[in-house]
């Protein structure tokens, strides 16, 4: 798992599916965690223009080319659609945060050869997130 996480974190930029304007939600905390660690992150939210001052994209399909890793913080049914779009977009690494995991989405990643993290590991714990 450490190798999978290292590969995920080696991306030049990160997509955040389920990014939220609500600072209490994990979709916002994950975005802020990347920013706290000096990483480029792109929030995906079809209903917001900016989150934490960063321009949003409405869908996975609109992510910039340097996004090779995707954090997923969505309900499992939505995760399945997000993963489908990410595979179609050529995303290399997908991290399903605790609660976002779906057996079908994990299987789709494995079938497509995508590096998938869906074992309950949390990015906030791995990178060390400070809420302030």
Image (spheres, rainbow, N blue to C red):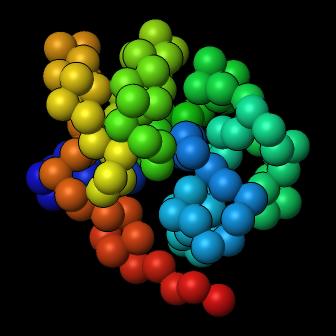
Instruction: Identify the residue at image location x=74%, y=59%.
Output: 21
Instruction: Identify the residue at image location x=17%, y=22%.
Output: 107
Asked if residue 132 is positioned above or below residue 116 in the image, the reply reads below
* Image quadrant where one finds the C terminus: bottom right
Left or right, residue 30 beside residue 58? left
Farthest residue toward the bottom?
132
Instruction: Identify the residue at image location x=24%, y=60%.
Output: 121
* Whole-percent x, y for residue 34 in the image: 55, 63
* Whole-percent x, y for residue 84 in the image: 41, 16
Tell me if residue 95 can be seen. no
Of 61 and 78, nearer the camera is 78
Tell me if residue 76 can be seen. yes
Farthest residue toward the top?
88
**How many numbered marks, from 0 up?**
0
* Whole-percent x, y for residue 38 in the image: 60, 67
Of 89 and 6, nearer the camera is 89
* Residue 96, picture quadrant: top left
Instruction: Identify the residue at image location x=15%, y=57%.
Output: 2
Asked if residue 65 is positioned above or below residue 71 in the image, the reply reads above
Of 2 and 43, nearer the camera is 43
* Whole-percent x, y for residue 100 in the image: 36, 45
Left or right, residue 119 beside residue 48? left
Left or right, residue 92 beside residue 68? left
């Amino acid at each position: 798992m450490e190798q999978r996480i290292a590969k995920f974190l080696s991306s030049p930029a990160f997509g955040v599916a389920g990014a939220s304007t609500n600072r209490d939600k994990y979709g916002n905390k994950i975005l802020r965690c990347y920013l706290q660690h000096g990483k480029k992150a792109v929030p995906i939210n079809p209903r917001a223009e900016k989150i934490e001052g960063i321009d949003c994209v409405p869908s996975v399909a609109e992510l910039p080319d340097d996004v090779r890793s995707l954090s997923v913080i969505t309900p499992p049914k939505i995760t399945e659609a997000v993963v489908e779009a990410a595979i179609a977009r050529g995303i290399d690494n997908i991290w399903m945060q605790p609660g976002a995991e779906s057996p079908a989405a994990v299987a789709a990643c494995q079938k497509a050869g995508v590096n998938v993290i869906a074992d309950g590991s949390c990015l906030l714990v791995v990178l060390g997130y400070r809420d302030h």
